[in-house]
Image (cartoon, rainbow, N blue to C red):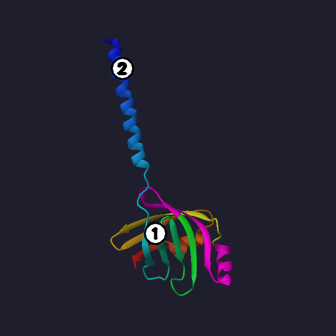
């Protein structure tokens, strides 16, 4: 009888650990990745969530052929982590941008979408003052 009680207790303990592991795994799931093309309300900045895990920032919209290409991942509470992987555009423009936003720069921001409106705020990272001042704000879906 004591052996059966011990076996039941062991089975219950294992089941509890499995269920606890499932709830932790569910909590750690990343939110759906941002998607679409967004234009800053009243501005010219455009953000394009191109492919899965790729974000392109067009600081001058369609006026200047320039894109800051980033690898990005979506996390909890709308936090997006990004790393600049490439600058696309004319060579002279690319060189100017690389001085301010170098390849390898890492940053994060909060991205919240409701209907066809989005808000980018809480941009953080080393040497990201220029990005913060230009990108934070409201966006409209294009």
Q: Position of residue 67 (x, y in %)?
A: 57, 77
Q: Pointer 1: what residue? A: 120
Seen at 54% across and 83% down, the residue is 60
Q: Position of residue 34 (x, y in %)?
A: 43, 66
67 lies above or below 21: below
Q: Is residue 89 left or right of residue 113?
A: right
The answer to which of 127 and 2 lies nearer the viewer is 2
Instruction: Name the image quarter holding residue 1.
Output: top left
Q: Which residue is mark 2?
A: 7
Query: x, y percentage for residue 116?
Result: 35, 74
Q: Secondary structure at mark 1?
A: strand
Residue depth check, mark 1 versus mark 2: number of the one nearer the observer = 2
The stretch of residues the image draws in magenta is 72-100
Seen as rendered, the residue at the extreme top is: 1
Residue at x 65% of width, y 79% of height: 94
- The vertical placement of 16 against 58, above or below, is above
Q: Are marks 1 and 2 in contact (CB under 8 Å)?
A: no
Left or right: 131, with 117 as reference point: right
Please name whichever residue, 70 or 109, is drawn nearer the observer in this view of the structure. 70
Q: For the residues marked 1 and 2, what is the alpha-carbon distance in whole angstroms?
A: 54 Å
Q: Secondary structure at mark 2?
A: helix
Q: Residues within 10 Å of mark 1 (few under 14, many from 20)?
A: many
N-terminal label among 1 and 2: 2
**Residue at image location 39% in from the left, 42% down from the top:** 22
Magenta residue check for 99: yes
Task: Indicate whether residue 108 is drawn in magenta.
Answer: no
Q: Is residue 68 left or right of residue 6?
A: right
Seen as rendered, the residue at the extreme bottom is 63
Dividing the image into 4 quarters, which one contains the C terminus? bottom left
x and y percentages locating residue 109 in the rendered image: 50, 64
Single out the residue that lies furthest toward the left.
1
- Number of residues whose C-alpha sits closer than 10 Å to that of mark 2, classed few (under 14), some (14–19) or many (20 or more): few
């Amino acid at each position: 009888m004591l052996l059966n009680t011990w076996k039941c207790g062991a089975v219950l303990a294992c089941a509890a650990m499995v269920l606890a592991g499932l709830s932790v795994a569910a909590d750690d799931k990343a939110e759906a990745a941002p998607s679409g093309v967004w234009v800053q309300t009243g501005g010219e900045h455009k953000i394009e969530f191109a492919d899965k895990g790729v974000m392109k920032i067009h600081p001058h919209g369609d006026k200047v052929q320039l894109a800051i290409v980033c690898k990005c991942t979506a996390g909890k509470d709308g936090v997006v982590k990004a790393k600049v992987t490439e600058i696309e555009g004319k060579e002279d423009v690319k060189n100017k941008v690389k001085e301010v936003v170098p390849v390898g720069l890492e940053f994060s921001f909060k991205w919240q979408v409701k209907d066809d409106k989005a808000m980018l705020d809480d941009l953080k990272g080393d040497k990201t003052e220029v990005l913060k001042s230009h990108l934070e704000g409201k966006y409209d879906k294009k």
